[in-house]
Each structure stands twice: as structure tokens, then as C-alpha cells.
Amino acid sequence: MCLVVGCGGASQPAPAPEPVFQFEEDADPILGGLAYVDEELLIEVFPGADPDDIADLLEQLDAIVIEDLSDLEELDLSVLGVNPEDLEAIAGELDASDLIETVQKNYIFEPDQAPDDPLYAAQGYLETIGVPAAWDITIGSDAVTIAIVDSGVDLTHPDLVDRIAGGWNLYDHNANYNDLTGHGTKVAGVAGAATDNAIGVAGVTWSCPLLAVRVTDEKGRASARHLASGILWSVNQGAKVIVVSFAPLWSNAVVRWAAERAWARGAIVVISTGNDGNVSASVGYEQALFVGALGGDDQIASFSDRGPFVDLVAPGVGIRTTALAGDYALVNGTSFSAPLVAGVVGLAWSANPQLRPATVADALLDTAVDLGEQGDDSVYGRGSVDAAAAVAEASQAVFVPDSTPPTVSVVAPVDGATLRGRTLAEVTVTDDWGVDRVVMSIDGITVGTDRRYPYRFVIDATKFAAGDHDLSFAATDPSGNEGSPVTVSVTFAGSAIGASEASAPSVGFTAPAAGSTVTGSVTISATVAADQGLSAIEWLIDGRSVLSSSIGGVSSDVSFQWSPVGISAGQHTITLVVTAADGAISEATLILLTD
């Protein structure tokens, strides 16, 4: 990988400054301005990489693994301890290694904030979004657990004491998940305070158990890796709905990967949009529901962040909920819009527990009350959640068992290729319900597992005997259907040296010039070549794949039409990844500015 201006042959004006490593997520100016843990890096190793080679690399860089998140949470991330003064330099070295797939900062996120319950009369917003009518269908089910990934919960609160089904403190790694700041207690009360118990307030769901998962420090702040760990710990405990009331998470790769894993394993993550009134061009991610806040008269709250990533809105002003020391509070914020929606997700799933996450999410999106511009928009998303309509649709949905396995296609290497040194293998997988994992085997022995797109593995030909070998790839979907392995036969050259410069594809941008400011639609052009023949190209904008295609021959001029309309002003990263017929992969990155 290369994430610096001018790598891969892009021309530079003279004299050129020393290239500085740039984290992909910093291309989002809002995310790039966040605080981060300056003594930690989060890395993802290519599946198939030799652990001894990884250890040698980290020793050379004076970086140590302080936590491995892959064993329990299936996050395939390691947390590295580094000298803060060397963080960027070490990140650049890791990024340049053919053993490391991604390098991330560990960003820090701030929290966003007819029953006989005495305060129910002050909870008119429940009537507004149809919750009492939804209760006529279901008040929840103990088969649908809602996890509150936050600052913990006041375990002695009379409206919560009988609602908490357990929890864990992932920040301190112990069983003390009592709330220190009160934010998690407020979120929990909105989603599931005890209802019809003659005290306090009513939660959206009466019967869905709550998990209290503390991921924050003593000030209520949570890092990306703790949020991701909290999401996947909750899934491992059986949670179906997970509330994350922190922001801005719409572009955070680490939390996105956790949400994708949760979705594949049958859970939905509900995330608050944020309370800074920001406008972002991010599209978020399909495997989570981002929730904005409504004020009065079905108008978006002035503080609610907005952008294409917004899925739904819900009341977020004047929300009554539980607070520390057995008290109650009146709160505002998308932090409390998100648990309203999470509670509705819990009710909808309770009405039909067999449903897949996509069907439950669609029940909320399809029935939302359209607000603002007609159709989906960047302020209200699909509209305001309608609990009664969503639960009714979910209750009528028909569960169709999934018996169709995924289909795998090998992008690289091609059958008959000769591999030298370290090479990347890449496959594409199609399945109507998503992909749980892809496994690569060499001569029948499993050597790597990849759980997220793009599905890529490192193969080190020097670790195997010279000669012919079979590479097999098999994919499994969330329902457990495993497709038949797809096999390509290759030859390992057996050389102790890495792949030659001639075998690695070359890629260089030709237009526009690096650092240019562009307006409107622009054609991005590049030249690619590979002595062993070309196989595929992929274009990424700010780290997100937008177009991939097959390509032949040994050299070609390629182009991509980019229209930055609606994208936030500032710096953006365009990456072109080229795969050769023998599996070798190169990429170049171009930095452009928009105003």
C-alpha cells in the first residue's frame, strides 16, 4: 500500500517536500480533527502472513502488541504500542509492508446525550412515533437482547435493576460495569426502562433484556477499538440490537468493520449521528442504522449532524429517562434518538424473531414517515421512525431459509501463474445475504481466513517447496452455507528473494496534477502495466471502493470519471489498485482538493 502524494509514479513539482504519511480516515476533515490515542496504532495483518515475519517487522520498528482483538471479537485487529513521537513514521513503515493490510489511528469519541409510570405523561414523543400502538402487537421478547455499549449502567436504579441481564467492563477488563458518568444509564432508560411498574419512565421495550457494556474511560470517552470490541463482545453474548451513542462514526473504519461483523452474525448496530451540526459527505455503511434527532414539529434539531449517511430520525429533544442515583433527567441529543430506534428494532424483531437483520432494518426504513425533501435525503434519511408500522410489517414478513451457498471467483493469481516471494491473492464473493468468511488453503491446508471485503491473502512462495501447488478458496455465508472451493494451480519458484520489480505491476497517475483543486466532474487518468499481464483494477475514493473491473494486456491507459458533488470541501484521496495476472498487486494514490 502507499498513501502518500506522488507514490506509484505520480509527478511532483520540484523541489518536492519529504512525503508525509497520511491516514486514510484523515481525508474526512471532521474525523481528521478528532483526538486519538497517540501511543497506539491499530493494524490488520493480511490473512496468510507468517507470524514470525510479523514479529520481526514489529521488532524492527520498536512496536509491541499490547492487545490482540482477533481471538474473542473476530475483529482481525492488533493494538500496537508505539512511541508517540514516532507514530506517523511507524505507520508509514507498516503501511509500506506487504504483510500489513491496514493501519489506523485509535480515534477517541465523545458521547452524543399507557403504562402507569408517573412520568409517562411527559413522554409524548413515544406517542408521536407510535410506540403505544406497537405495544398492542408486542412489548418485546426475552429472545431479543439489546446491548448498551456506553459508560455502563446504574445497576441499582429502580427502573433498571430488573432489566439488566448482565454486562462487562471492556475498558478495565473486569466485571464492574457500573456507570461512572450517567450517559449509559440515560441511554439504557430510553431503550428499555422498566415499564408499567408504577415508577419513573417507560422504555420503548418492556421485555427485551439489556446488556450493560462499559467501553469508556472515567471521563466518558471511548476509543474506536473499545467501541468495536464492545460491539462484538455483545454479539458473542447473543445481543441482537446494539446501541452506540457516540460520534462521529460515519467514516470510522474500525467501528464499521465491527458493525459489518455484527450484521453477518445476525445483529444490528444503531449509531447516533452526532450533535455538532456537522454536514458530512460520508455515505456511512449499510450494516448499521445512523439516527438523527428531531426537535419540535417534526423538524430536524439544529444540533443534529447530517449527510448521506443518515438513515432515520427520531425525537431527540426533551427526552425523559433514567439518571444516576435513582434519579430521572430531561435530556437532548442524538444519543437518545438512537436508543429510541434501537428499542423499535427490538420490538420489530420480537414480533418475528427468525428474521434476518436486513429484513428487520428494512421494516423500519420502509415504514418511516417521509420528512423534508421527498424520498431519502441527507437531513432526515428515510424519515421519522414509525414504531407501529415497523412492528406490523416485521410481524407479517415471511422468513425464507437461506440454502444457497456463496459463489467465489478468483481475481488473482490466474491458473498457471508462477509466484515468487510475497504475492497477494484476491477473490470476489457473491451471496444474497452477505459473506461471513473466506478461507484460503494451500494444498488442502488452511493458511488464512478473511472476514471482510476486499478478500485478500498474502502468499509467501519462499515458505513452501518449489514446484506446483493448489490454492483453494471457500466462502461461507451468515446462514452457514459453504460454497464448493474454487482452486487454481500455481508454481512456486522457490526463490528466497521477493518478487522482482519486473513482476510487480506499475501504476502512475497522469492527470490531474497531484494537489490540484477540482470543481465539478473531473477525469482521473493513469497508466498501468505488468510484464506478466494485467488482471484487474479498482478505484477507491477516501478508502472506499467505488469501481472495479477486469483488464487485459500488459499495459493500458485507464480513467475514472469522478464527480465530487455533495462531498465536503477539503483534501480527498484517490487510490488506484492494480492486480497483475500472477497475483502481484500495486497501488498509487493521488491527493486532490475540493472547494
Image (cartoon, grey):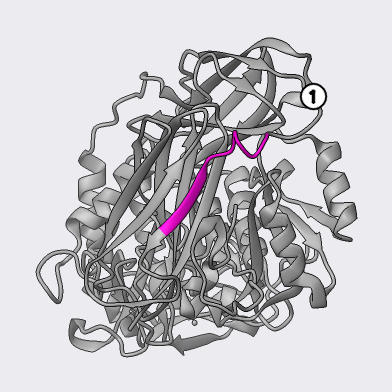
Compared to residue 275, the image places residue 81 above or below, namely: above
Above or below: residue 147 compared with residue 235: below
Number of numbered discs: 1
User: Is residue 543 rendered to the left or right of residue 352?
Assistant: right
Decide whether residue 378 is among the magenta residues.
no
In this orientation, which residue lies closer to the viewer: 322 or 92?
Answer: 92
Q: Answer few, some or many: residues within 10 Å of disc 1's Cα (few below 14, many 20 plus, some between 14 and 19).
A: some
Q: Quadrant of the C terminus?
A: bottom left
Mark 1 lies on residue: 463
Q: Nearer the viewer, residue 561 or 275?
A: 561
Q: Residue furthest front?
A: 14
Residue at horizontal 59 percent and vertical 57 percent from the top: 2
- Would residue 382 be found to the left or right of residue 267 on screen? left
- Magenta run includes residue 502: yes
Q: Main secondary structure of the magenta part?
A: loop
Point out residue 56 in the picture as x, y percentages from the top left corner.
Answer: 88, 46
Q: Position of residue 138 (x, y in %)?
A: 32, 51
Q: Which portion, as a residue range, is magenta?
A: 500-509
Q: Which residue is at 68% across, 44% downward?
A: 98
- Disc 1 residue type? Lys
* Residue 373 image-quadrant placement: bottom left
Q: Is residue 358 visible?
A: yes
Picture coordinates of residue 395, whole percent (x, y): 25, 42
Q: Quadrant of residue 80?
A: bottom right
Residue at x 51%, y 55% (from the top left corner): 588
In the displayed structure, would residue 574 be above or below residue 422?
below
Foreground residue among 200 and 300: 300
Is label 1 in a helix, a strand or a loop?
helix
Tell me, yes or no, if residue 136 can be seen here.
no
The image shows residue 530 at horizontal and vertical percentages of 50, 36
